[in-house]
Amino acid sequence: MEGKVHLVTGGSRGIGRAISLALAGEGDVVYFNHFDPDEDAATETVQMLKDRGVEAFGLKFDVGDPDRVKAWVAEAFEAQGKIDNLVNNAGITMDALLVRMTPEQFERVIRVNLTGAFFCLQAAAKVMMKQRAGSIVNLASVAGVMGNPGQANYSASKAGLIAMSKTAAKELAARGVRVNAVAPGFIETEMTAAVPEKLAEMMKSMIPLGRAGQPEDVADVVAFLCSDAARYVTGQVIHISGGLYM
Ligand SMILES: NC(=O)c1ccc[n+]([C@@H]2O[C@H](COP(=O)([O-])OP(=O)(O)OC[C@H]3O[C@@H](n4cnc5c(N)ncnc54)[C@H](O)[C@@H]3O)[C@@H](O)[C@H]2O)c1
């Protein structure tokens, strides 16, 4: 098959939608999942991809469910015969100060952001190791490097993703599979729309490039990491934060 096969978690909206659009060219196939309450954003993303000549399948399931993840990856592989790229983008926040954070808040965020990415990575790695090619990109965050008040769960999940990316990069390199992470700063999506305005303004004022990021700012770097132009890049963490972290 000539076209590329891309798997993107959390691809219905925000950064995941931008990644799906940036990765896929005419003749490619995108499988994305999401866990939105409704299908509106997913349906729109499928249409946007189809308008570009990309075959697109959006499916609702929880990335923290290992059986659903296995079935999803198997379905893509059985239908297409290969998987070129996996982007672990699905992520949530459940912010609370450390002393007030409930076990449920801590565990749910780890489950989706870190364990869910592990399930996808494991299932895709089995395919990619056999085909001796593939690229995996994990969406970390500057919070996983710098820490962020109210985000003990989130920052731990993102730091875990960085460490897991490096381990996977070392384990899979000999089989021609590359694994990298990106660490976005403050990107304007539904996730950051929930940040109180005063706090958002304060965060933006700390960004050297002088503006919040857009989903496409992240998607372009992810597309680069998945492309042949990045064939000698593995185990790296690329910060996409307008200089917030340097
Ligand atoms: N927006 C930012 O400023 C920012 C900064 C750093 C990192 N990130 C990371 O980038 C990624 C995308 O963030 P965004 O801002 O586009 O978020 P968003 O809330 O706009 O979109 C999140 C996507 O993940 C999906 N999702 C949520 N829970 C899921 C689950 N259990 N199973 C499957 N899919 C699920 C949603 O359906 C949606 O498609 C996340 O991993 C986030 O942590 C975002």
Image (tube, rainbow, N blue to C red):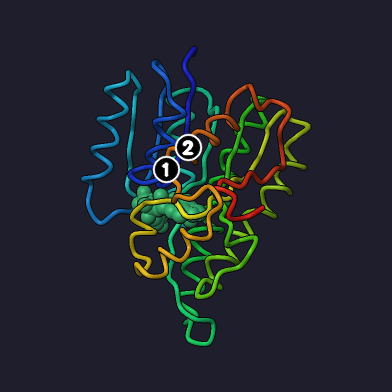
Residue at 41%, 25% in the rendered image: 29
| Marks 1 and 2 close (CB-CB < 8 Å) | yes
Front residue (pair 45, 207): 207
Q: Position of residue 116 (x, y in %)?
A: 51, 55
Residue at 78%, 32% in the rendered image: 174
Reading the image, the residue beneath label 2 is: 219
Q: Amino acid at mark 1?
A: Pro
Whether disc 1's CB lies below 8 Å from ligand 1 is answered yes
Q: Is residue 67 visible?
A: no
11 w.r.t. 191: above or below: above
Q: Position of residue 45 (x, y in %)?
A: 29, 36
In the picture, measured across the screen, residue 104 lies left or right of residue 168, that is left
Residue at 62%, 31% in the rendered image: 128
Q: Is residue 44 visible?
A: yes
Whether disc 2's CB lies below 8 Å from ligand 1 is answered no
Reading the image, the residue beneath label 1 is: 215
